Image (spheres, rainbow, N blue to C red):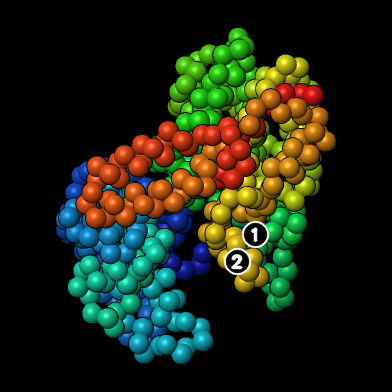
Amino acid sequence: MTAVDKVNQAYPATEGDPAARDAFMAILERRRSTRMFKETPVPRELLERLIRAATLLPTSCNRQLWHFVVVTEPALKVRVSDFSDAQQSYLYDAPALIAVFYDTSLETRNPCRTAEVTVGMTLGALLLAAEAHGLGAIYLGGIRRPSGIAKALGVPSYLRSFGLVCVGYRDDDPPSPNRRPVGDVLSFNEFKLAHERYHADIRPHLWKLSQIADFRDKLLWYKGVHIDGKTLHVDSDARFSPKFQYMIGRIGMMLAAYSEPRVLDVLSFNGDVVLQLLNACRGGVGALYAYDLTPGIARYIDERFRQLAPPGKVVGLVNAAAETVSIPLPDGHVQVISCYERLEHFEDPRPLLREMRRVLAPGGRVLLVVSNRFYPHLYRFKRMRQKNYSLGRNWNRGPERKYEPGQIRRLLEETGFRVTAVAGLQPAHLKGVAFVAAVFRRMGRHAVADRLADWCAQRYVTEGQGKYFSSSLAYELVKN
């Protein structure tokens, strides 16, 4: 019996159509954000029905000052993307985009921001109507220049752009996201919060382990991974980026030393490293463990890999304690461990490092990638100077602390590891060369830009002194 059935049984409706009520709740429960679309065009009549549904919801003072522009021409999609700096791949994949505009000029001083509330209801109606009509849809609000949508479509300046809704026939089946229980979000007559939420602050010392877990648990379902191999905003690095290629190559060499080794990926988030290992090893691994902090993430990993690997080959592990890092594996159980830029979550990463050492078998090896403090992470310096520690561009990573190379070595030695090799990934000077290459490309001098890009690719990994000024440091470890 579903939650809806239980409510209906306990509190039978005295008015209205129970079947319609149940059908509406079913639409709400099955709706998912769609990021993979079939090429099948959406009929014009169906798009008009979606707009009709949007116009049936209330507006402030009944002004009804929306305007919708449907975009189906591929060239116009490119223009919209270029003008607005919207970089999501599903903007191009969706057969239709619905650009949503509203005249907010009469409500600029309303303290409740009623124009924004009006558009929020409008967008909700579009998404639910798409679901009801057998379509997939997603609201695309991650746009750097929303006014560029209006410019690309010739919309007058008095209409404010509120983003895009991508619509089409669904070509994915994403797992159902985790929803907070009603008891966690509801209070009667006075405010009560069952669980402390996470912070809008980047500094890890403010975060409890349960808050980091909650942040990761909810964010994971936000994006997922596209079929083209790019991670959609969960992490900043594409799955086929030089950093990922380096990691998988090194882990592959570690695995070659064992016969069907057991492998642990620590705080993998969405299983990208695990997926690459599956592709690289072609069944030559005994077991792949993806350890994270909540049952929801483990469920996501299990559902994602259900059709990608034999049963039991990929196992999602859940942290065994509420406020203590505890990997639920026996001592000395795995031969290879990977951890990709996850120490940064913690003000003190030693508990996690000790657990990694505990589950590592004698003679086992670890690949640990750590973001380097001695790299010009300009967004952090700017926020530190302004004493503005909000997550900012790190809203999709959570808390982070950049460590100095000397700090990392001391932490590793204190927790019983010995460093066998260190490599720097993306030295600082490559950033300047990449900028020059981009300038040449904008000038149309693509041959020069390509040569500079090749030069950067050949020097992406360094083991000289320049490694200490690289974006990330890759440590290969064994038990001391």
Q: Amino acid at mark 2?
A: Arg
Kindly check if marks 2 and 1 are in contact, taking CB atoms under 8 A apart as contact: yes
Residue 85 in sight from this viewpoint: yes
Farthest right residue in view = 414
- Foreground residue among 413 and 307: 413
Q: Label 2: few (<14), some or many (≥20) within 10 Å?
A: some
Residue denoted by label 1: 202
Residue denoted by label 2: 383
Q: Secondary structure at mark 1?
A: loop
Q: Quadrant of residue 258?
A: top right
Q: Residue at x 39, y 53 (%)?
A: 435
Q: Quadrant of residue 8?
A: bottom right
- Foreground residue among 416 and 115: 416
Q: Which mark is residue 267?
A: none
Farthest top residue in view = 259
| Quarter of the figure with the C terminus | top right
Q: Nearer the viewer, mark 2 or mark 1?
A: 2
Residue 78 in the figure: left or right of residue 104: left
Q: Residue at x 25, y 62 (%)?
A: 80
* Marked residue nearer the N-terminal end (2 or 1): 1
Cα gap from disc 2 to disc 1, whole angstroms: 10 Å
Residue 125 in sight from this viewpoint: no
Q: Amino acid at mark 1?
A: Ile
- Foreground residue among 133 and 310: 310
Q: Label 1: few (<14), some or many (≥20) within 10 Å?
A: many
* Residue 68 vertical placement versus 315 (above, below): below
